[in-house]
Image: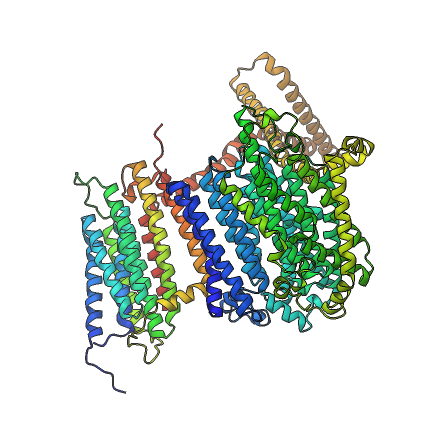
Amino acid sequence: MHVTLTHYLIASAILFSFGLFAVMARRNAIMVLMGIELILNSANINFIAFAHYGGMHLDGQMAAIFVIILAACEAAVALAIVLNIYQQFNTVNVDEVDTLKD
Amino acid sequence: MTPDTTLQLTDYLFYFFALLAILSGGVVVFSRNIVHSAFSLMFTLFAVAGLYVLLNADFLAVTQILVYVGGILVLILFGVMLTNKIVDVQIKTGNIHILPASIITAIIAGTLCGVFTLTDWFVVPDAGAPVAKSTASHIGEALITNYVLPFEVASVVLLVAMIGAAMIARREKKK
Amino acid sequence: MTQEFLLQLSLAVLLLPLLSFVVIIFFGRRLPRQGDLFGTAILGVDLLASLTILFSKLNFFNDVVPNFTFTWVDFHTLVPSATKMADFPLKLDIGIMIDNVTAVMLVVVTLISFLVHVFSTVYMHDDIRYSRYYAYLSFFSFSMLGIVLANNFWLIYVFWELVGISSYLLIGHWYEKKSAADAGKKAFIVNRVGDLGMFIGIMIVWANFHTMTFDGIFSAIAAGQIPFQSDAWMTAAGILIFCGAIGKSAQFPLHVWLPDAMEGPTPVSALIHAATMVAAGVYLVARVFPMFTADALTFIAYIGAITAFMAATIAIAQNDIKKVLAYSTVSQLGYMVMGLGVGAYTAGFFHLATHAAFKAGLFLASGSVIYAMHGALHHQNDHHTDAQDIRNMGGLKKKMPVTFWAFVMFTLAISGVPLTSGFLSKDQILAGTLAFSDLTGHTLIPILGFGAAALTAFYMFRLVILTFLGEHKDPTRLEHLHESPKPMIIPLIVLASLSFFVFYSFNPLTPADGWFYHAIERPVTVVPASLASASSEVFEEAMHHEHTTAMYLSLTVASLGILFAFLTYYWKKISADAFASALAPVHKFLLNKWYFDELYHATAVAGTIGFSRLLAWFDNTFIDGIVNGTARWTLALTLGVKKNWEVEDHAKGMVEDHAKGMVEDHAKGMEGKREAMAYLFFAALLSVYVGWAAGNAALSGAGIGIAIGKGILGLIVAGGTFFLLHAGVGGFDNKVVDGTVNLTAYLAGFFGLMLRKVQTGRIQSYILFVLIGVMVLFFLFKL
């Protein structure tokens, strides 16, 4: 079938769902992070696909660039937090880190 | 106007990259070995970069490879190596409330796909075809004209994130 | 050679020192000789490039002004829909331009900077922060060239602050010394005062013309636009912009920082605080000259004249060789500003160029003397004698001939002796002041100008005589004094030769035929004719008329000054001490620099500190008072309530004890009284009721039986009430009131426990709930 906008959107939707699942169900904090990266990538695909097919060429790409920048920041800070958690609790499983609950 | 039903090279490329992205994305999420996940993520990111190229975003594709594969993925691998006892069997990671998560994910995926297919998107008539022209110079221009403020703010955010990450990850001295 | 090439070359001139700064600050310690040769070589290349620019500008592009402008930011497109923005484009154009003034300044800056670099290789050789020193020198050169090349206020302001910070860093180079650190701060803060005015001036211009480029502003004014349609605003804008020059060029009210800035290394004083940075203010005035109104120019002329005279009087009484030169610099800057203010544009700018050469030379020569003195004193293990105090010098002529002759050359130039560059420029400025007073009647300005000229000749020759001539009080002290090494005296020779007239004009009496006067012409003013000062032609005519008078007058006052200096300090016909004691109040006044520091200390500094104290007091008394008062009242309230509780508990306990029949005697004392009161009260109530009931029945004519019955009923009712009151209140409190409270607490706990089961503490469960909620909402609104 000829590739249209919808194809890109559905590919991104599937990636998004995968990422969501990882965020919800995986216990390892780093897996959660990877899920977030998947979600951001799917959002980027949407940005660029809409820009490409909607005729607003650069604006979508600019948004994607800033998403990538923020993803880099987020990955750095999040991994720093994960390392810190690991030092504190000797685990990176998010469900075991619930000190605030008590 | 009769739609051109013959598949072109770009269509094949799209299917290849999309399939690669989805398959390796699946491995990322469902693999029980976190190292496998991390390496599989690399393929996903490459495939997404391929999709960018098909969408005429060559600069972004290169950025994706440089930043994600070169930076974030390496960072994630470091995280994996630093926080898992590789000599033990700890490297496998489990899931929690897998059933409700699966159900809600399926519902969301279904809803999204439904919305995407059913909506009548506004599409510029001749937008589908790739243009053989680099976007790098245009993006550079846009970054120092229309987008100069977000650009500067982003640079500050990067700086803050860098300092913050260094501060947080700093090992406290044991008393 | 094209204009583009010229622009690219000037960009290279601008950016090469920046490159040198980056390289030296990051890799300086690893470079051979800590990177000094690298910095010096870069400046050498810069100098050659600047000479090329000057040469080709004068010969090939004399009538065109190469200009390169681009839009740096354009906020207009960020808010495309904002209709308000339509007539106010938020657009910033910046760029560079090369007119003749710029070309001359480029050469001046790079030449002095290069010579100072060479000089410093020896002078600063043993410094602990040698590498950083060179980095800062390069950074300063970069910033200064930026000011020179900029074609708009925005860029000028940016580089203006950059030279400020490099000046701060270099004054405080020896920051271990408290006086040096303080001098740096003082320079920085005093400059901020001037920069504030300049900033407001720029904002006035920007708010009215929506452009920062000089071309744009000038053409807007020429087209009849005036800030806020008011002549006063036009003048105010000019004076406010001039405030920046007052700060940077150390003019009258804000000159106090420059003498203190001599705490920095002497080559820095030569480069920044004598030749280039302090001239930036003069350059700024020259740059925006067309937009000054006649009133603003008169203001400028007065500021310059006052500065020139005041600083010259202070210089007479100073004993530190660098302090004398510092006040001399302030005075000469006043000359330049005065020259520009009276309209002698070319003369004022010409004096900037000639002064840069001979004043930098004076500072470098004094550096050479200080270096030699340090060496000699160090050799004798004397670390207490001040190597900069001219009272410890004398007779250095024989020991340091090259330095001496160079110093004499510079002194002749600054005193305005014929055949020197200083004569050419100073004479023209003085002629300009005479012409100005002829045209406008401001006679005070030429009086101050000529007075300052006489004083200049006097204190400069005093300096020469005390330092180099005569005999040293103790010749043994000078045994180990010797001439400075070559890298220090070669710059002196270069600058000394540049102080001859031939470099500027072949006619030793007037510069009007020289290349400089052909290159630099007074720009045509753009302000409306009703506000403008005398036009160029009228002024030239008047100046021509006064030229001979000015020459004779200035020669006379200069010779008088020199004569008095020799009479006093060389032939000792006049005793300086006797003179000083005869005029003791004046001498003290001058020695203390007109008490400016004390004045500012008493007003601005003390005012700031007093205001801070007031704020601190307000904070301590009111803000803290409110906070502490709240705390205290809460505490008092709490304590009071607590006391009541204690009483209640006590009473309750008593009642229980009573019921159990375990009444203690001492408890009875207090409680018994209260109970007795209660019984008495109820007894009284009872008797009243019984009496009322009985009376009522009797009056109504009923039988006595009914009356007794009513009385018994009343007794029962009263007794029951009393019993209920006595025994039941505790029960009501315990059961009903406490019960309600407990029920509330129980319910809260119950629901809390229920909710707590949902709260797993696992963040992922929350995400799950959120997503479920999102989906529910989606389908709710979809369907």
Q: Position of residue C587 (x, y in %)?
A: 77, 35
The colour style of the image is: rainbow
Above or below, C689 relative to B160: above
Residue C264 seen in this snapshot: no
Instruction: Give the x, y percent position of residue C665.
Output: 59, 12
Residue lying at 19% horizontally and 43% vertically, measured from the top left: B91
Q: In the image as oriented, which residue stretches furthest toward the bottom?
A: B1
Image quadrant where residue C676 sits = top right
Residue B21 location, x and y as percent? 22, 62
Q: Nearer the viewer, residue B65 or C521?
A: C521
User: Tag count in the figure?
Assistant: 0
Query: Is residue C774 positioned above or below B16 on the image?
Result: above
C305 or B87, which is in the foreground? C305
Near-viewer residue (C291 or B155): C291
Instruction: Determine whether, in the image, residue A83 is placed left or right of residue B159.
Output: left
Locate residue B88, reporting x and y percent.
Answer: 17, 38
Q: Which residue is drawn at 36% across and 76% down?
A: B122
Left or right: residue C183 compared with residue B25: right
Position of the N terminus of chain A by quadrant: bottom left
Q: In this view, does B60 lie to the left or right of C313?
A: left
Residue at 41 percent of width and 41 percent of height: C34
Q: Quadrant of the C terminus of chain A?
A: top left
Query: Can residue B32 be seen by looking at this rendering?
Result: yes
Where on the picture, by quarter, is residue B81? top left
User: Position of B145 compared to C314: left or right?
Assistant: left
